[in-house]
Image (tube, rainbow, N blue to C red):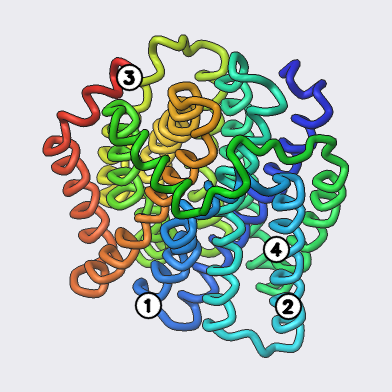
């Protein structure tokens, strides 16, 4: 935690803290609100899919842009845009005029901010602490993110149950204001690592060419796709399964969803304290496999305690995946390729939109529980079929 004494890292950490709190706060609130309005698991999955879509569409370009632009200005723009979107939702909700399509547009725009935050703020964290401390720094950042996955859903359920959807947006707006101040006070400026005359397409092509030469990094991206297509979409079914199968109200669903964050927080802290560099690849691969198993246990859980434990353990393994994903890329890539390759990681994260669409389709065709089990089981099969790629990651 001594890294928090570095002023720029502390400000970057705080901005990430606020962005994460609001992300999990809004994701659960929007899912519950949309499910109450429509009764459709497909609509719920689509709202989360729209939040992931910009990563797939723009991730590579954002990664290339992060090498050219002043990253501090990009971060300020991300926070400012989120403030404008949240203010619009707060006003619409206050007037009683909010509709599902408003939530869909907001999810997409805020997803674009998430896509930019992934490579930009992580690059800035690396610039602030140096390559030798990047693993610890990202563990702290991941622990914070997972801590907000406890706080965000709990606050969301409470606010939604007691004061309605309007309170969620005004509360989010109040959180964003100090985050904007922190972003403006960051002392670092953009550190360009390539010639400014190189085109975006050239930058992306060079990143892909470098990736093609390193099977280890290919393995990281393959595992990222598997996690995001077959594992991560299951989070969109937590409100649906919690409401329909487990009989929980908004507060109960919020507490259930926070179990994932509790596990993630513990996992990130354990990695920061105990993980050795030689273990990073094994932690990454094992975490993906075990997360998929926990998704199946959650979907098949007969009662709330089993569901809560499954989500807790899933969060623990999710932390292993999340921390190691960016750390492995940052450590394995040369300086001039880091932003571009982190941008490609964002594209792989964006493939989650396929999983959300597929899961929504399965949920409408069968039941949300059956669909979630089937999706995770296919993820395990995908891991078996891609063994030649992730075996290289074990040696990374």
Secondary structure under tag 4 reads helix
Q: Nearer the viewer, mark 1 or mark 4?
A: 4
Viewer-proximal residue among 46 and 53: 53
Asked whether the beta carbons under mark 2 and mark 1 sit within 8 Å of each other, the answer is: no
In the rendering, at what x and y percent does residue 355 appear? 30, 59
The residue to which callout 1 is attached is 40
The residue to which callout 2 is attached is 88
Q: Is residue 22 left or right of residue 361?
A: right
Q: Is residue 40 left or right of residue 95?
A: left
The residue to which callout 4 is attached is 82
Seen at 61% across and 62% down, the residue is: 26
Seen at 56% across and 45% down, the residue is: 118
Badge 3 local density, few (<14 within 10 Å), some, or many (20+)? some
Q: Is residue 65 left or right of residue 263?
A: right
The residue to which callout 3 is attached is 282
Residue 363 placement: quadrant:
bottom left
Q: Of marks 2 and 1, which one's residue comes earlier in the chain?
A: 1
In the rendering, at what x and y percent does residue 2 appear? 75, 16
**Whole-number angstrom distance, CA of label 2 to CA of label 3:** 45 Å
Viewer-proximal residue among 178 and 154: 178
Please identify the quadrant where the N terminus is shown.
Answer: top right
Asked whether the beta carbons under mark 2 and mark 4 sit within 8 Å of each other, the answer is: no
Seen at 50% across and 19% down, the residue is: 271
Q: Of marks 2 and 3, which one's residue comes earlier in the chain?
A: 2
Secondary structure under tag 2 reads helix
Regarding residue 286, the answer to whether it shows in the image is: no
**Whole-number angstrom distance, CA of label 2 to CA of label 4:** 10 Å
Asked whether the beta carbons under mark 1 and mark 3 sit within 8 Å of each other, the answer is: no
Q: Is residue 6 left or right of residue 276?
A: right
């Amino acid at each position: 935690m001594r890294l928090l004494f570095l002023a720029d890292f502390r400000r970057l950490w705080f901005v990430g803290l606020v962005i994460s709190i609001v992300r999990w706060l809004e994701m659960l609130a929007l899912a519950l609100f949309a499910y109450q309005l429509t009764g459709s698991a497909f609509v719920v999955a689509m709202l989360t899919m729209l939040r992931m879509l910009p990563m797939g569409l723009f991730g590579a370009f954002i990664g290339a842009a992060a090498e050219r632009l002043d990253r501090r200005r990009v971060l300020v723009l991300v926070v400012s845009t989120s403030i404008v979107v949240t203010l619009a939702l707060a006003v619409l909700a206050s007037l009683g005029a909010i509709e599902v399509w408003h939530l869909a547009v907001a999810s997409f725009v805020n997803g674009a901010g998430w896509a930019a935050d992934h490579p930009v703020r992580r690059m800035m964290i690396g610039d602030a602490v140096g390559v030798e401390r990047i693993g610890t720094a990202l563990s702290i950042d991941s622990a914070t993110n997972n801590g907000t996955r406890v706080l965000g859903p709990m606050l969301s359920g409470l606010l939604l149950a007691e004061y309605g959807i309007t309170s969620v947006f005004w509360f989010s707006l109040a959180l964003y204001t100090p985050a904007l101040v922190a972003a403006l006070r960051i002392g670092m400026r953009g550190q360009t690592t390539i010639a400014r005359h190189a085109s975006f397409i050239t930058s992306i092509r060079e990143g892909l060419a470098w990736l093609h030469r390193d099977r280890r990094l290919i393995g990281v991206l393959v595992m990222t796709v598997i996690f995001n297509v077959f594992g991560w979409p299951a989070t969109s079914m937590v409100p649906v399964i919690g409401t329909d199968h487990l009989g929980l109200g908004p507060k109960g669903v919020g507490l259930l969803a926070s179990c994932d964050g509790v596990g993630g927080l513990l996992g990130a802290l354990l990695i920061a304290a105990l993980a050795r560099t030689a273990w990073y690849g094994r932690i990454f691969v094992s975490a993906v496999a075990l997360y998929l198993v926990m998704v199946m246990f959650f979907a098949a859980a007969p009662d709330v305690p089993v569901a809560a434990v499954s989500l807790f353990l899933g969060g623990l393994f999710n932390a292993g995946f999340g921390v190691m994903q960016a750390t492995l890329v940052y450590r394995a890539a040369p300086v001039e390729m880091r932003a571009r390759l982190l941008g490609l990681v964002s594209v792989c994260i964006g493939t989650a939109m396929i999983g959300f669409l597929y899961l929504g389709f399965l949920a409408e065709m069968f039941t949300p529980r059956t669909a979630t089990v089937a999706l995770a089981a296919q993820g395990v099969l995908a891991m078996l079929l891609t063994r030649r790629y992730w075996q290289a990651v074990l040696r990374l």
